[in-house]
Image (spheres, grey):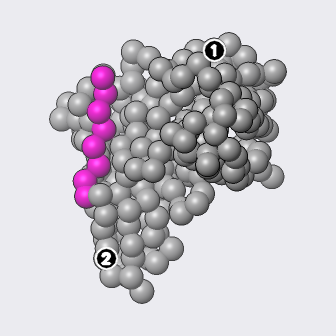
Amino acid sequence: KQEVTQIPAALSVPEGENLVLNCSFTDSAIYNLQWFRQDPGKGLTSLLLIQSSQREQTSGRLNASLDKSSGRSTLYIAASQPGDSATYLCAVGPSNDYKLSFGAGTTVTVRA
Amino acid sequence: DTAVSQTPKYLVTQMGNDKSIKCEQNLGHDTMYWYKQDSKKFLKIMFSYNNKELIINETVPNRFSPKSPDKAHLNLHINSLELGDSAVYFCASSQDLVQETQYFGPGTRLLVL
């Protein structure tokens, strides 16, 4: 059974600092890995999707890397802004069934 | 335009009641999902339909029954509500199973008293 862990559970940084969010998973047989953002009281917004054959994806200030063999992904957010404050969720898509497995998320606070 | 919409947004009800949550997507996707997010914020898949066919049916009480009248709709009916059913329920859709980005609705916050 796939288990997804996100460390740290919470993170508070001053504006302008770079953010590093970690995600680890136990079964390396995956289709893809997705990073989502969840604002309080809202649904999830997809940020980046990395296919299993890819090593990284970039979108604006966001960069996500994937190391399948070690079961790790890292989301980097450059030059953080108060608007980046949210919970970031990592989800792994397996290769043997159709169920996304989610981590518990990292709650980020960017202080102005 | 709202991509994935859910109704209602909030639902407060008494134990033992039966309630339904509706979901609609206007993205033309083939696959739709129901997730439950508990108080610890863990998201867990409950059901998935692909082209109106049930694909994923996780171990949830049979009081929960999904219904997909067409590809654009996936409703969730809950019988005999219990206190432990209180959670946020999210609907999502994707072009196909797993390989594509999933788009989530805003969630339905269910509180059972």
Q: CA distance from mark 1 to mark 2?
A: 44 Å
Q: Nearer the viewer, residue A72 or B57?
A: B57
Question: Does residue A21 appear anywhere in the picture?
Answer: yes
Is disc 2 placed on a helix, strand or loop?
strand
Q: Nearer the viewer, residue B90 or A51?
A: B90
Magenta part of the protein: which range?
Answer: A1-8
Q: How many marks?
A: 2
- Callout 1: residue from which chain? B
The numbered dot on residue A61 is none
Q: Residue at x 81, y 21 (%)?
A: B69
| Residue B85 forms part of the magenta stretch | no
Is disc 1 placed on a helix, strand or loop?
strand
Left or right position of B30 against B99: right
The numbered dot on residue B54 is 1
Q: Residue furthest left?
A: A70
Tell me residue A94's x, y (percent): 39, 24
Query: Quadrant location of residue A72?
Result: top left
* Crowding at mark 2 (Cα within 10 Å: few <14, some 14-19, many 20+): some
Q: Residue at x 60, y 57 (%)?
A: A42
Q: Residue at x 30, y 38 (%)?
A: A4
Amino acid under disc 2: Val
The residue identified by callout 2 is A13
The answer to whether B106 is drawn above or below residue A15 in the figure is above
Amino acid under disc 1: Leu
Tell me residue B7's x, y (percent): 77, 45
* Crowding at mark 1 (Cα within 10 Å: few <14, some 14-19, many 20+): some
Of badges 1 and 2, the one in the foreground is: 1
Left or right position of B11 against A65: right
Question: Does residue B29 appear anywhere in the picture?
Answer: no
Tell me residue A6's x, y (percent): 29, 49
